[in-house]
C-alpha cells in the first residue's frame, strides 16, 4: 500500500466489510470504535469469516453533534447480520487517498490539505468517506509513528 502523505487519485474495487453502523455523538466516537471492533471481531470469528485488511471507520454523513458511521473490517465473505453487525459494501470507482502520519488529534491538517488538493484538481468529493487504521492505537505506540489511510470517493456525474 502506498504510504504517501500527498493526496493521490486512485481507482477502488468494491470492498465488503463486516461492521456496526450507528449514529454516534461526536464525544463518544472512541467508545463506539472500541465496542464495535470487539463485537465485529467476535461475530466474524463465530461465522468463520476472516478480516482481509486493517480496521476501518466509515463516515456516512457530515459531522454535527452526531455522525452516522460504521466501524468494522474488510472481510473475506459477507457476514450474516448478528449483534448489530452486518455486511456493508464500500463503493468502487475513483477516489482521493492520502496517508496521515501522526496521532489522530493532528488529522485536521491532513483533511485540510486533502480538501484543498481535491478542489484545486476540480475533483468533487462524494458524501461518504472512510479511514483505514494502518497502525493500532495503543498506549505504547509513539503517536508520530501512527498511520491512517484516508479514502474519499469522488462524486461521479449523473449517468456515469
Image: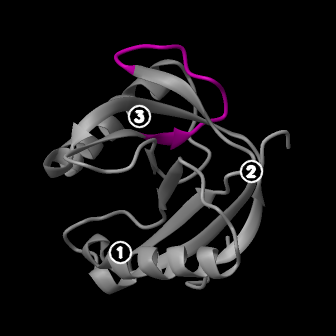
Give the CA distance from mark 3 to mark 2: 33 Å
| Residue 56 in the image, given as x and y percentages of width and height | 47, 50
Label 3 crowd (10 A; few <14 / some 14-19 / many >=20): some
The magenta stretch spans which residues?
Answer: 71-84
| Residue 64 in the image, given as x and y percentages of width and height | 25, 49
Q: Residue at x 45, y 32 (%)?
A: 19
Q: Residue at x 37, y 82 (%)?
A: 109
Q: Residue at x 57, y 74 (%)?
A: 98
Q: Which mark is residue 27?
A: none
The residue that disc 2 covers is: 156
- Which badge, 1 or 3, comes first in the chain's sequence? 3
> SS class of the residue under badge 3?
helix
| Residue 36 in the image, given as x and y percentages of width and height | 31, 35
The residue that disc 1 covers is: 107
Is residue 3 visible to the viewer in this orientation of the structure?
Answer: no
Label 1 crowd (10 A; few <14 / some 14-19 / many >=20): some
Residue 141, placed above or below residue 154: below
Amino acid at each position: 500500500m502506498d504510504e504517501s502523505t500527498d493526496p493521490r487519485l486512485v481507482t477502488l474495487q468494491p470492498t465488503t466489510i463486516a461492521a456496526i453502523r450507528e449514529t454516534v455523538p461526536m464525544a463518544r466516537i472512541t467508545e463506539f470504535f472500541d465496542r464495535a471492533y470487539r463485537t465485529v471481531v467476535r461475530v466474524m470469528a463465530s461465522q468463520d469469516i476472516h478480516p482481509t485488511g486493517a480496521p476501518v471507520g466509515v463516515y456516512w454523513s457530515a459531522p454535527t453533534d452526531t455522525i452516522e458511521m460504521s466501524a468494522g473490517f474488510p472481510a473475506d465473505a459477507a457476514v450474516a447480520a448478528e449483534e448489530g453487525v452486518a455486511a456493508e459494501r464500500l463503493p468502487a470507482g475513483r477516489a482521493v487517498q492520502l496517508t496521515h502520519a501522526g496521532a489522530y488529534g493532528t488529522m485536521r491538517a491532513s483533511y485540510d490539505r486533502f480538501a484543498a488538493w481535491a478542489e484545486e484538481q476540480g475533483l468533487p468529493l462524494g458524501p461518504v468517506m472512510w479511514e483505514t487504521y494502518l497502525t493500532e492505537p495503543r498506549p505504547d505506540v509513539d503517536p508520530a509513528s501512527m498511520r491512517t489511510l484516508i479514502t474519499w470517493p469522488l462524486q461521479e456525474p449523473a449517468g456515469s
